[in-house]
Image (cartoon, rainbow, N blue to C red):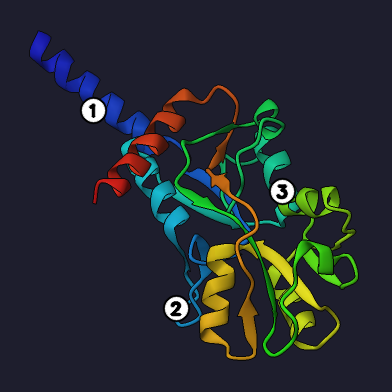
Amino acid sequence: MKRHLSIAALALAASAMAAEPPLVLITTTDTPPYSYRDEATGEIVGLEIDLARAAAAKLGRELEIRKAKFPELLPMVSAGKADMAASGITITEGRLQAVDFSVPYAVEGGMFLYRTGEPMPTMIRAERLRVATMDASTYDFYLSTHGIDPIRYDSYPRALADLKARRLDAVFFDSCAVKLLAEEDPELSASRLETRENFGIALGKGNTRLKAALDEAIAARRGQ
């Protein structure tokens, strides 16, 4: 009788796990190589996606990916409208008041992307330039504290289009993405690294199980 009860309990537990809703990850899908849409397949891929999917698997959950604008990411997680947010998000003391973060999965920084053949932007020179960055990002704050009033965008592709159309002089954002774009497009160049920041995946306050799963996934990735 006890054996039958044990089997029934296990079946019930498995059924409950299967009934759990998917974990929701929100991202801008435009921060390669961390989170971006593969043009060939249309699929959202990248390091952050791999880490979130691995964490979800550890918890026996599916992963659902939704697109959002960068300024919406942390407020949506804080309000419980998503489980995780990832889009090259810097871990800061201020943000930790509203959300928790995984351990850092990358140490990155901000760089200027500018048109090849033009003078390389610096913080001093940028005060006289039309410089764009992501609204509500740490780069927005960084530029502002250096006396630069940036033009704020909610999408990197829009800023890049305006840079190539000469409506901007430079775009300041993640060094990894800047280097990739400069390598792929001879019309664009990357400046020297200006900042150093820890990137992490944001999650709701107090969600210790999800944080542990994310931290384990990041540790496993480092060990590869």
Which residue: 58% across, 91% down? 186
Q: Position of residue 15 (x, y in %)?
A: 32, 32
Residue 205 vs residue 56: left or right?
A: right
- Side of 67 relative to 38 (left or right): right
Q: CA distance from mark 3 to mark 2?
A: 31 Å
Q: Amino acid at mark 2?
A: Thr
Question: Which residue is drawn at the image coordinates 67% and 88% (left, top)?
Answer: 116
In the rendered image, which residue does mark 2 sit on? 41
Cα separation between marks 3 and 1: 48 Å
SS at mark 2 in the image: loop
User: Residue 70 appears at what percent x and percent y?
Assistant: 71, 54
Query: For numbered disc 3, what is the local secondary structure?
Result: helix
Which secondary structure lies at badge 1? helix
Vertical position of residue 126 compared to residue 27: above or below: below
Count residues near mark 1 (Cα–Cα under 10 Å), then give few for <14, some for 14-19, many for 20+: few
Category of crowding for the residue at label 3, using alpha-carbon neighbours closer than 10 angstroms: few (below 14), some (14–19), many (at least 20): some
Residue 117, located in which quarter of the rendered image? bottom right
The first of marks 3 and 1 along the sequence is 1
> Where the N terminus falls, by quadrant?
top left
Mark 2 or mark 1: which comes first in sequence?
1
Determine whether label 2 and label 1 are within 8 Å by CB: no
Q: Which mark is residue 101?
A: none
* Amino acid at dot 3: Thr
Q: Amino acid at mark 1?
A: Ala
- Which residue has dot 3 on it? 138
Mark with earlier residue (3, 2): 2
Find residue 11 and name its label.
1
